[in-house]
Image (cartoon, rainbow, N blue to C red):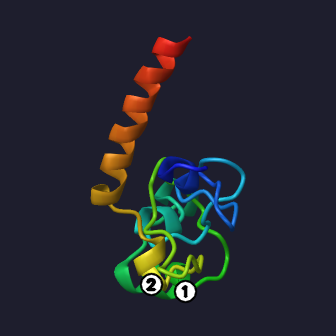
Amino acid sequence: MYTQADYILGKNPRSLSYVIGYGNNYPAHIHHRGSSIASISVLQSAVGCVQGFETWYKRSQANPNVIYGALVGGPNDKDEFSDDRFNYEQTEPTLSGTAPLIGLFARLQSFWKLCR
C-alpha cells in the first residue's frame, strides 16, 4: 500500500512525480513565470509582460528553468493530469501546497534519522 507521499513522489498510475525536479519523470510545462522564461543572464535582455506571454508562455517546449521542490496542483478527481502551462489548475505550484509537503518530509527525515 502506498502513502500519499509515495503517490506525490511518483508511485502512481502515471509514474509521475508531482514535485518538480524529483525523480526522472515530473511535469516539464509548469505554470510559473520564473520557470517558463529563460533568465535575463541567458537572454541578455529583459522580458516584458507581452513578450513573456506571447514568446515564452505559449511555446510548446519544456520550461527552461527547473523550480526544484515545487509541488504542482496534481491530478484531477479521475486521476488524469495534463502537463500544459495553460492548465494552471494542475500545473501551477503554490506555497500553500508546497509548504505542508516540506513539513511532512522534514518530519519523515527526523524519523529516518532515528531508524539509522
Compared with 20, 60 (above or below) is below
What kind of residue is marked 2?
Phe
Is residue 100 visible in the rendered structure shown here?
yes
Compared with 33, 52 (above or below) is below
**Which residue is found at the position 58% from the left and 50% from the top?**
2
Give residue 83's position: percent from left, percent from top: 59, 76
Q: What is the tally of numbered marks visible in this picture?
A: 2
Earlier residue among tags 1 and 2? 2
Query: For numbered disc 2, what is the local secondary structure?
Result: helix
Return the residue at label 2.
53
Return the residue at label 1.
58
Compared with 77, 115 (above or below) is above
The CA span between labels 1 and 2 is 6 Å
Q: Residues within 10 Å of mark 1 (few under 14, many from 20)?
A: few
Q: Nearer the viewer, residue 11 or 32?
A: 11
Q: Residue furthest left?
A: 96
